[in-house]
Image (spheres, rainbow, N blue to C red):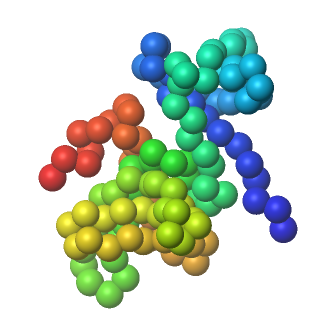
Amino acid sequence: EMREIKFRVWDKETKNIYEVRNIDFISEMVEIKYQANYGVRELENVILMQFTGLQDKNGVDIYEGDILIYQHMFVDKKSVSEVIWNEKYSGFASYVEDDERRYILEKELKNQFEVIGNIYENPELLEV
């Protein structure tokens, strides 16, 4: 089963997140969808966020840069963390700073994750 490859972008100029329609790495342009229209941005003016292939407990797609609440399994504790690409494990991970652990995002754990925002629009969610 092939993982769905899709992206969204944070536009550094408009300070908005847009759905990506097309990426051209040769011309370094990205075609984005905003409202009912399409527009083109230079790659240097946006930050690409890749879809992890997973959804949270509410069926919301999880992307790089998303901020999640993680409900711990055996203790009554929640952690807030950012979704990042983890080179060591070659997978997307949610890095929880309070206990120095990385939670690799897995389908089996999806009921414990909830997207509450992202690092560009809601950076304050990561402040302890």
Relative placement, left or right, of 39 versus 96 is: right
Left or right? Give the position of 51 relative to 67.
right
Q: Going 56% across and 41% down the picture, which residue do you hit? A: 49
Residue 29 image offset from top left, x and y in percent: 69, 20
Residue at 46 percent across and 54 percent down: it is 84
Q: Determine whether 97 is above or below 4 in the image.
A: below
Which residue corresponds to the image point at 25% horizontal and 63% vertical from the top-left? 97
The percent position of residue 44, horizontal first and vertical second, equals 55, 22
Rendered position, 68 above or below 36:
below
Residue 57, visible in the rendered structure: no
Q: Where is residue 7 in the image (x, y as percent from the top left)?
A: 65, 39
- Choose top left, top right, bottom left or bottom right for residue 21: top right
Tell which residue pokes out farthest to the bottom in this image.
74
Q: Quadrant of residue 26?
A: top right
Front one among 52 and 89: 89
Question: x%, y% of residue 33?
Answer: 68, 21
